[in-house]
Image (spheres, rainbow, N blue to C red):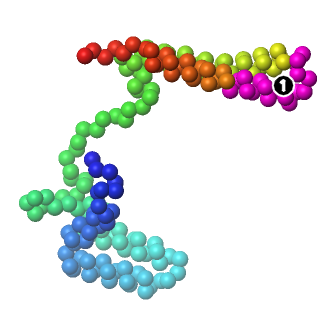
């Protein structure tokens, strides 16, 4: 696989389709397009051009598929290419359901629950503890918010440390 910037111009499939058309087909397509443009320069003109193009593509037998030529001069469309086995997309849920990832899934769920609960308890608990010390309500909630942010960072740091010190089950 090459990166997109090394693949070349994007108009290559269109050029291959044009090369696969006979000169008569190309001339008929150009005439139909010119006729459709001359017929109506109203709002429906674009629909006529699109319909004419689709009709011509069906007559050509391509149905919008890319025509490629093989080494022996034979032509085939994308629809005729042999089916390649496709793997299901890897998602977080599928990865965590595998047997070798069960322990990781448990740790991840525990830290996710901790991350959801600890800051909420921290903000409410800090606000209640500061009621007798700080009389201004806005300042009290601000201090509680700072404590909640610190608790979030502590839980995330603990998760990183846990993952760092966790033993690898990879057999060498």
- Percent across and percent down for residue 59 are 27, 69
- Percent across and percent down for residue 34 are 37, 83
- Tell me: 147 left or right of 43: right
- Tell me: 7 left or right of 69: right
Is residue 83 at all visible to an observer of this figure? yes
- Quadrant in the rendering for residue 143: top right
Q: Quadrant of the C terminus?
A: top left
- Quadrant in the rendering for residue 171: top left
List the single residue furthest toward the right.
Answer: 135
List the single residue furthest toward the bottom.
Answer: 38
10 Å crowding of disc 1: few (<14), some (14-19), many (20+): some
Query: Relative to the observer, which residue lies in front, 106 or 16?
Result: 106
Q: Is residue 76 above or below residue 97?
A: below
Please count the marks in the image. Answer: 1
Mark 1 lies on residue = 140
Q: Is residue 171 above or below residue 44?
A: above
- Percent across and percent down for residue 165 are 45, 15
Q: Is residue 17 magenta?
A: no
Which residue occupies 46% across, 19% down?
163
Which residue occupies 25% across, 55% down?
78
Which residue occupies 32% across, 80% down?
30
Q: Is residue 29 above or below residue 69?
A: below
Helix, strand or loop status at disc 1: helix
Q: Is residue 134 magenta?
A: yes
- Percent across and percent down for residue 87 are 30, 35
Q: Is residue 69 above or below residue 30?
A: above
Is residue 58 at all visible to an observer of this figure? no
Query: Relative to the observer, which residue lies in front, 1 or 50?
Result: 1
Q: Where are the magenta residues, as a range? A: 131-149
Considering the whole magenta stretch, tell me its main secondary structure.
Answer: helix
- Quadrant in the rendering for residue 131: top right
Which residue occupies 46% across, 74% down?
46
């Amino acid at each position: 696989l090459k990166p997109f910037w090394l693949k070349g111009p994007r108009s290559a499939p269109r050029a291959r389709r044009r090369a696969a058309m006979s000169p008569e087909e190309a001339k008929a397509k150009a005439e139909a397009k010119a006729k459709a443009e001359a017929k109506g320069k109203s709002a429906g003109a674009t629909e006529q051009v699109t319909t004419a193009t689709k009709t011509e593509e069906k007559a050509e037998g391509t149905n919008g598929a890319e025509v490629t030529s093989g080494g022996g001069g034979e032509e085939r469309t994308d629809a005729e290419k042999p089916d390649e086995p496709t793997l299901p997309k890897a998602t977080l849920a599928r990865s965590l359901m595998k047997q070798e990832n069960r322990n990781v899934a448990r740790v991840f769920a525990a830290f996710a629950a901790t991350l959801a609960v600890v800051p909420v308890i921290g903000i409410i608990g800090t606000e209640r503890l500061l009621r007798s010390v700080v009389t201004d309500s806005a300042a009290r909630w601000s201090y509680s918010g700072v404590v909640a942010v610190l608790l979030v960072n502590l839980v995330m740091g603990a998760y990183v440390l846990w993952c760092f010190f966790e033993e690898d089950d990879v057999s060498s």
